[in-house]
Image (spheres, rainbow, N blue to C red):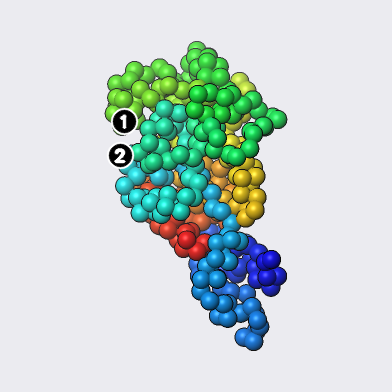
C-alpha cells in the first residue's frame, strides 16, 4: 500500500521557482530543485529514514509518465539545415528512458517517417499541422475507438483523419488566385523550385509535395494585401496558420490532434498518470502548447521568441531551435528525476 503521508504523484512535490522574467507570473515553473514535503524531523516518513534503494523504487512506482510532443522545423530541426545534431544528448536520454516522443509537424507523413527512421522513433506522429494522427498498429494495448472521427486502418498504422481533403485546399487556392491574390502553393511548384525555396534536397522536396491535409503557400503580393488574403481564406470556410510558410487547412490544428493522443496515453498509463510536454517555435504550435502541462517555446532562428505565443505557464527555452530543445528537455528530465 502507498504510504499516505508521502506524495502520490511527482506533481504533488513542491518545486522552487526560478521563473524566466518573461514567463507568465501566475504559475511557477517546475524546472528546478525538488523539495520534499515539510514533515517534522521526527516523522516516520522523513525521506532520510528510508534506504535510497527504497526511495528510488517508490518514485519509480508513483512517477507520472512523461509524454513529449515536438514540432520539427525550427524546433527540433534547425531552421537553415534541418539538423537535430544539437539536440542529440537529450534525444538520447529520452530514448533510453522510453519516454514517448511524438512528432507533431506541418511536414507530410513521408517526411516525418524519414525523420522517425533517423531518430529510431517508434511512437505515433501527427502530420500536416494536425491533419492526420498516425498510430503504429499494436502501439496502444486496447482497441482504438474515437467516436468523433473516423479511424482508417492501413498496413502499418491506424490513421485518425482530422484534416480537410487536399483537393479542396488546392481548389480554394486556385479561387484565391482568380480573385487577384498572389499565392503559390507547394502543389504549384516543381520539385526543383520547392527544393530551392525551402532549402531542401530534391528527394526531401518530393516528400514534402505528397500532401493529404494541408497546403503550405507563399504570399508573393504586397504586404498590405496579406490581411485581406487571410480574411478571404476564412470567408471560404478554411483556416490558416503559420510556421515556416503560411498554410491553408480545414478545421484541424495541432492542438486537436494532441488532445486525442493525450486521452489515449492517459488510458495507457492510467496507473501512474501522465505529465504532458510540448515544444515548439511558431504560431502553428500555439494550439499544441495550450493543451499540455508543460509548454516550452524555443527561440526562433533570429534569437527572438515568437511574440504571438503568450500562454500561462509558458517556459521559454534558453536557446535557438534544437539547442533550446536540448537544454529545456535536459532540465525537464532532471526535474522529473530522470
Ligand atoms: Mg516550427
Query: Circle 2: is it few (<14), some (14-19), or many (20+) Cα within 10 Å?
Result: few
Q: Which residue is mark 2?
A: 81
- The residue shown at (61%, 61%) is 62
The residue located at (62%, 55%) in the rendering is 272
Residue 78 pos. (x, y %): 35, 43
Residue 13 in percent (x, y) is at 61, 68
- Give the x, y percent position of residue 259: 62, 41
Q: Is residue 237 left or right of residue 77?
A: right
Nearest to the observer: residue 158 or residue 291: 158
Decide if residue 178 is in sight here.
yes
Closer-to-camera residue (336/181): 336
Q: Residue at x 59, y 61 (%)?
A: 61
Asked where in the image residue 198 lies, by quadrant, the reply is top left
Q: Residue shown at 34%/44% (left/top)?
A: 84
- Give the quarter of the image for residue 217: top left
Q: Is residue 100 above or below residue 10?
A: above
Q: Residue furthest top?
A: 178
On screen, residue 231 above or below 98: above
Contact? badges 2 and 1 (CB < 8 Å):
no
In the image, 80 versus 274, the foreground residue is 274
Q: Which residue is mark 1?
A: 200
- Distance in Å between CA atoms under marks 2 and 1: 8 Å
Specify which label sits upstream in the sequence, 2 or 1: 2
Q: Badge 1 local density, few (<14 within 10 Å), some, or many (20+)? A: some
**Is residue 220 visible to the viewer in this orientation of the structure?**
no
| Camera-nearest residue between 100 and 281 | 100
**Coordinates of residue 104 in the picture (x, y in percent):** 49, 38
Q: Describe the element under mark 1 as helix, strand or loop.
A: loop
Quadrant of the snapshot with the N terminus: bottom right
Amino acid at each position: 500500500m502507498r504510504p499516505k503521508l508521502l506524495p502520490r504523484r511527482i506533481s504533488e512535490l513542491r518545486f522552487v521557482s526560478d521563473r524566466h522574467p518573461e514567463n507568465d507570473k501566475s504559475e511557477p515553473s517546475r524546472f528546478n530543485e525538488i523539495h520534499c514535503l515539510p514533515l517534522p524531523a521526527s516523522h516516520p516518513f522523513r525521506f532520510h529514514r528510508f534506504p535510497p534503494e527504497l526511495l528510488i523504487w517508490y518514485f519509480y512506482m508513483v512517477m507520472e509518465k512523461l509524454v513529449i510532443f515536438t514540432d520539427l522545423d525550427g524546433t527540433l530541426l534547425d531552421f537553415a539545415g534541418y539538423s537535430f545534431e544539437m539536440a542529440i544528448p537529450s534525444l538520447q536520454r529520452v530514448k533510453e528512458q522510453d519516454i514517448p516522443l511524438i512528432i507533431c509537424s506541418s511536414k507530410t507523413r513521408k517526411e516525418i517517417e524519414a525523420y522517425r527512421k533517423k531518430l529510431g522513433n517508434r511512437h505515433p506522429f501527427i502530420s500536416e499541422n494536425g491533419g492526420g494522427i498516425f498510430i503504429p498498429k499494436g502501439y496502444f494495448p486496447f482497441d482504438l475507438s474515437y467516436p468523433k472521427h473516423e479511424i482508417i486502418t492501413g498496413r502499418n498504422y491506424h490513421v485518425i483523419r482530422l484534416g480537410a481533403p487536399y483537393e479542396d485546399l488546392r481548389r480554394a487556392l486556385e479561387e484565391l488566385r482568380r480573385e487577384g491574390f498572389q499565392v503559390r502553393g507547394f502543389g504549384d511548384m516543381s520539385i526543383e523550385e520547392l527544393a530551392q525555396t525551402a532549402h531542401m534536397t530534391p528527394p526531401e522536396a518530393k516528400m514534402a509535395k505528397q500532401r493529404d491535409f494541408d497546403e503550405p503557400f507563399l504570399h508573393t503580393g504586397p504586404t498590405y494585401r496579406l490581411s485581406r488574403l487571410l480574411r478571404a481564406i476564412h470567408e471560404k470556410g478554411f483556416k490558416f496558420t503559420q510556421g515556416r510558410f503560411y498554410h491553408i487547412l480545414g478545421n484541424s490544428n495541432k492542438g486537436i490532434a494532441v488532445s486525442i493522443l493525450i486521452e489515449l496515453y492517459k488510458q495507457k498509463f492510467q496507473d501512474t498518470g501522465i505529465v504532458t510536454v510540448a515544444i515548439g517555435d511558431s504560431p502553428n504550435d500555439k494550439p499544441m502548447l495550450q493543451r499540455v502541462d508543460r509548454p516550452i517555446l524555443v527561440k526562433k532562428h533570429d534569437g527572438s521568441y515568437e511574440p504571438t505565443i503568450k500562454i500561462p505557464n509558458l517556459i521559454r527555452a534558453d536557446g535557438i531551435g534544437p539547442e533550446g530543445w536540448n537544454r529545456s528537455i535536459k532540465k525537464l528530465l532532471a526535474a522529473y528525476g530522470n
